[in-house]
Image (cartoon, rainbow, N blue to C red):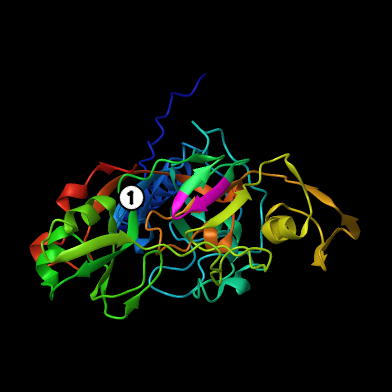
Amino acid sequence: MLAPPVDKPVSVPKKKTAFREWLDSVLFAVIAATLIRWLFFSAFVIPTPSMENSLLVGDYLFVSRLHYGTTTPITPLQVPLTHQTIWGTDIPSYLDWIRLPQYRLPGFTDVKNGDVVVFYLPVEHPDAYRKFGNVLPDLHPHPTDLRSNYIKRCVGIPGDRLEIRRGEVYVNGLAQALPPRMQNEYFVSVKTAVNEENVFHKNGIVDYSRFTETFSDSIATNDEFGYIVKTTAALAGKLKAYDFVRRVVPVFMEKGLKEPFLFPASDAVDWNKDNYGPIVVPKKGMTVPLTTLNIALYRDVIQNYDGNGHVSIENDKVWIDGKVVTSYTFKQDYYFMMGDNRHDSADSRYWGFVPKDHIVGKAVFVWMSIDPNPVNFLKKIRWDRIFRTVR
């Protein structure tokens, strides 16, 4: 005879505590934010004036990682949502015990001339950063995917022949269109004293200095009183309308006047920030003879960024893995970057090419803008810049 069925007690899931629910929510948010930040887009803030007036100090940007293709992490042992240090401290936020190979996922497009690009600073390579202490004194060596984020405009893509003549960029012999809000340096000669608040600040010019000595650079020598201002061509033209202004002229260094700390550090060139090149931007598969000039231009590429074995360069001779080479074929693409604030930007003119594996993404739009030095508290947020596209 069969025994009657016995109902088994139903197990009731244990209710989560409020703390456990909060912890699960935080964990989910961190994982989601980390994936979004790695795969789709990241938020950055502009800390320096190197891109003014296109981008201002205090602009908060969204940068698309999808445009050029997201790169896989190299340093996986890292505190989520950090970069180099743990928030508010100098404690490193990562361990470099594990290094993974980097891969780039397919993107929408390639980097083009004129794109505003975020990238990792190449010269934070352990074997390269020491040379740039006078130009970039805060450098520290980091793994590739944890180097400092820089934002500049791409002016030279792989294979381009680039030259700067009196501050104007030429690519493959053709003058390039100037960025709409590019900022340059001007000498403003005045007849009388100037109310700086009404003249400069009213016109949005914050970077200026009095000049009372003999002014001689790209214009005739004159004993004049005036100002050196950094502003756009449009605002410089507006200053000419004031009756107390004698003239407004751009300031350029003369051709042949060698500027210190410029790339490359070689006596083979006499370039400066306004008259630079010509220089050929390395392209994957391109082969160059290793002349004295080319060794100066491409030694960092060969030594630090192209994944070569043991490299030694002495007396205009290059050894790779113990063999002398007289020509070199590049293993990846490179780019030449410049800031829109042409006289106040530490860019490729000072530290060289940006490897493709250092490219992070394309700057898309400004989602918030906070003036670090507002006239008053009510003007701290720059409402006219919110949701402005980057171009």
The image quadrant that residue 276 belongs to is bottom right
Q: Nearer the viewer, residue 342 or 277?
A: 277
What residue span does the magenta drawing correspond to? Answer: 162-168
> Was residue 258 drawn as part of the magenta stretch in this picture?
no
Q: Nearer the viewer, residue 362 or 249?
A: 249
Q: Nearer the viewer, residue 101 or 302?
A: 302
> Would residue 178 appear left or right of 38 to someone viewing this image?
left
The image quadrant that residue 167 belongs to is bottom left
Magenta stretch secondary structure, dominant: strand
> Would residue 330 appear left or right of 354 to someone viewing this image?
right
Kindly give the residue lying farthest to the right in the view shown. 323
Dividing the image into 4 quarters, which one contains the C terminus? top left
Q: Label 1: which residue?
A: 61
Query: Residue 315's x, y, as percent?
Result: 83, 68
- Residue 80 visible in the displayed image: no
Mark 1 residue element = strand
Query: Residue 215's x, y, as percent?
Result: 34, 74
